[in-house]
Image: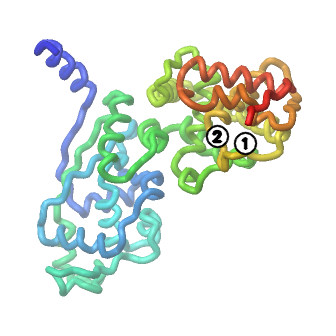
Amino acid sequence: MATKSIVEELEKNRQKIDVDHYDITIREISSMSTRNELHIAPTYQRKFRWSEQDESRLIESLFLGLPVPSVYVATNKDSTWEVVDGLQRLSTIIHFMAETEESLELVRREKPLRLSGLETLQSLNNQRFSDLPTSVQLQFKSRMLRLTALSDKSDPEVRFDVFERLNRGGVALTAQEVRACVHAGKFIDLLDELSENSEFKKLVKLKVGNLEDGTKQELILKYFAYSYSRATFDGKVSEFLNKYIKTENQKRQKISSMRNEFLKVCSELSTAIGGPVTRPGVGWTPQNQLEAILVATGELIKEGHNQFEPKAGWLSDKTLVAFSTGGTNTKTMLEGRIKRAKELLLGAPVTKIKK
């Protein structure tokens, strides 16, 4: 690549990122979390929690003045901060200094941290923050942490990339969990709400590890994205979903109608099949297949169909399965499984897979 091209590419992408750096006392960090100015996303709390001995070692490091890595935050539209990387450090500080039930609830703990396992500052073992002399408390509160804040002016797609890059070395978030942080708003709230709908949950059988990792929300996101924007689908699923969700955040007036539409789809489909979307030999819901079936149901309802009577064994239909397995992320495969799902929902004969 020519030098000019390299320089142009660097400049083009660097200007999309806007960051600020702050040195903030532990006292202020604790205060900001209490005032809801610094948010530790529930997504992260589900995925990770240090042991109390791990927490104790961090507190000891802070007392000793040892270098602690920067905390990365994203700036929201209301100027509050969302933690991107540094959950463990901030949660530990809040846990150690917690004086109220609200503070403990913030980090999902029942009691303030009692230090343990310290080898250098052994006199602090078995001590809580409230047990320490006032002078020592003040010394701890005056310690500084470096915060790097990604501005709300940064391009949302770049913010998504930053979240992913930072979390590869720490908490392993799924793409949808990252979207929930980057694109927080009414549409994300809608996805969370719909993911707990009883009719939707009847249709989905997930592995334990996928129950709380954003899989349900991403399935619903795909329903809307494939229903309304699949003409622009180019096989790059994550980028496609990011662009769609960015667009939907600008159409807040549609939330009510979107909710009603999806609830109708789930209700009709649940009534028609009476259980989760599964097929023999597959213990969990084939997600590509479910996405297509949801979209197909929605399109049929819009076309005036209000009764679905798929024939026995339709979820194992040869054509539907073929379009739902192996190289599924192409426009042809997507259109193929949606088309076949529509035919089967209306009672088309099932083509059996030869054994």
**Residue under the point 17% across and 65% down:** 142
Which label number is shown at residue 286?
2
Q: Quadrant of residue 19?
A: top left
Q: Quadrant of the N terminus?
A: top left
- The residue labelled by disc 1 is 279
Q: Secondary structure at mark 2?
A: loop
Front residue of 305/310: it is 310
Picture mark count? 2
Three-letter residue code for mark 2: Pro
Three-letter residue code for mark 1: Arg
Q: Secondary structure at mark 1?
A: loop
Q: Quadrant of the C terminus?
A: top right
In the rendered image, the vertical position of residue 99 relative to residue 331, given as above or below: below
Disc on the earlier residue, 2 or 1? 1
State which mark lies toward you, 2 or 1: 1
- Side of 137 where 166 appears, left or right: right
Q: Position of residue 8 (x, y in %)?
A: 18, 15
Q: Position of residue 207 (x, y in %)?
A: 59, 53
**Residue under the point 18% across and 85% down:** 122
Q: Position of residue 36 (x, y in %)?
A: 40, 54
Which label number is shown at residue 165?
none
Q: Quadrant of residue 88?
A: bottom left
Mark 2 Cα-neighbour bin, 10 Å: few <14, some 14–19, many ≥20: some
**Residue under the point 30% across and 54% down:** 86
- Side of 182 where 116 appears, left or right: left
Mark 1 Cα-neighbour bin, 10 Å: few <14, some 14–19, many ≥20: some
Circles 2, 1 touching at the beta carbon (< 8 Å): yes
